[in-house]
Image (cartoon, grey):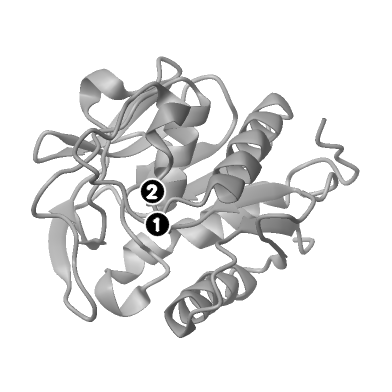
């Protein structure tokens, strides 16, 4: 298998916590066999990437999906990151590249495809080193089940915004539902687009099966044409 080039979109915050988080993603993708190209707000998306991974982070500005934050619940909004990632998502979708969206990245994909977000939900946002655990099972036959496990797996929860079933973009289908929320989806219009609301890069907090998503994503990216141009 050739080593595919995977663009990894991240925050440009210089905080120690953010840099540690970034390294988790880089390590997970590198260990899965990818050549990782880190892309921050202000950077140019490489037009020869074989796949794109959208990572966790702060909230997407609600005006991006037609909502108003009347109660001031949105956190850590970075307009430049919204601009970078929503544009990158739409370009990658148009090019039919493999895409993995994680937590915020899951939400970015839904917004890029015309979906909306619930601005604030309770009981899903762990603080610091705390871990909120769910056991979730992907729909049999879904790409997520094939990539990870058809059985229930332990995952973590670190989000306060979410996607309700009626907010899911029309070209996406829910592959995991929990507590009235969409926790994972896949595109019905693209060859390999998966979003998960949890953090598989935090390997100590999830079952090994959940972390296998990176291997499946990189394997799919390796099957991209050897010369790919993102429009």
x then y, percent, for residue 51: 68, 48
The residue indicated by pointer 2 is 59
Q: Quadrant of residue 199?
A: bottom left
171 on left or right of 152: right
Helix or strand or loop: what does disc 1 sit on? loop
Q: Residue furthest bottom?
A: 16
x then y, percent, for residue 226: 87, 46
130 on left or right of 194: left
Discs 2/1, front: 1
- From what the image shows, is residue 146 above or below residue 55? above
Q: Residue furthest top?
A: 170
Helix or strand or loop: what does disc 2 sit on? loop
Residue at image position (47%, 74%) is 18
Q: Quadrant of the C terminus?
A: top right
Asked if labels 1 and 2 touch by Cβ distance under 8 angstroms, the answer is yes
220 on left or right of 72: right
Seen from the viewer's position, the closer of residues 226 and 158 is 158
x then y, percent, for residue 15: 49, 79
x then y, percent, for residue 13: 54, 70
Q: Quadrant of the N terminus?
A: bottom right
The residue indicated by pointer 1 is 76
Residue at image position (43%, 42%) is 60
Circle number at residue 200: none
Seen from the viewer's position, the closer of residues 167 and 135 is 167
């Amino acid at each position: 298998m050739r080593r595919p080039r995977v663009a990894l979109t991240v925050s440009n915050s210089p905080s120690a916590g953010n840099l540690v988080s970034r390294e988790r993603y880089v390590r997970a993708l590198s260990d899965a066999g990818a050549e990782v190209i880190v892309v921050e707000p202000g950077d140019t998306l490489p037009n020869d990437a074989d796949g794109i991974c959208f990572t966790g982070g702060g909230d997407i500005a609600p005006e991006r999906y037609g909502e108003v934050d009347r109660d001031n619940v949105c956190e850590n909004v970075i307009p430049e990151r919204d601009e970078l990632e929503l544009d990158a998502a739409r370009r990658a979708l148009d090019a039919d590249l493999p895409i993995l969206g994680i937590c915020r990245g899951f939400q970015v994909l839904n917004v890029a495809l015309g979906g909306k977000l619930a601005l604030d939900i309770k009981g899903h946002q762990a603080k610091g080193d705390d871990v909120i655990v769910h056991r979730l099972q992907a729909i049999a036959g879904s790409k997520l089940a094939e990539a990870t496990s058809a059985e229930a797996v332990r995952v973590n929860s670190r989000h306060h915004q979410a996607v309700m079933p009626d907010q899911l973009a029309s070209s996406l289908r829910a592959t995991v539902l929990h507590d009235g929320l969409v926790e994972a989806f896949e595109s019905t219009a693209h060859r390999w687009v998966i979003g998960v609301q949890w953090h598989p890069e935090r390997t100590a907090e999830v079952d090994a099966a959940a972390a296998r998503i990176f291997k499946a994503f990189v394997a799919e990216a390796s099957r991209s044409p050897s010369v790919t141009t993102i429009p």
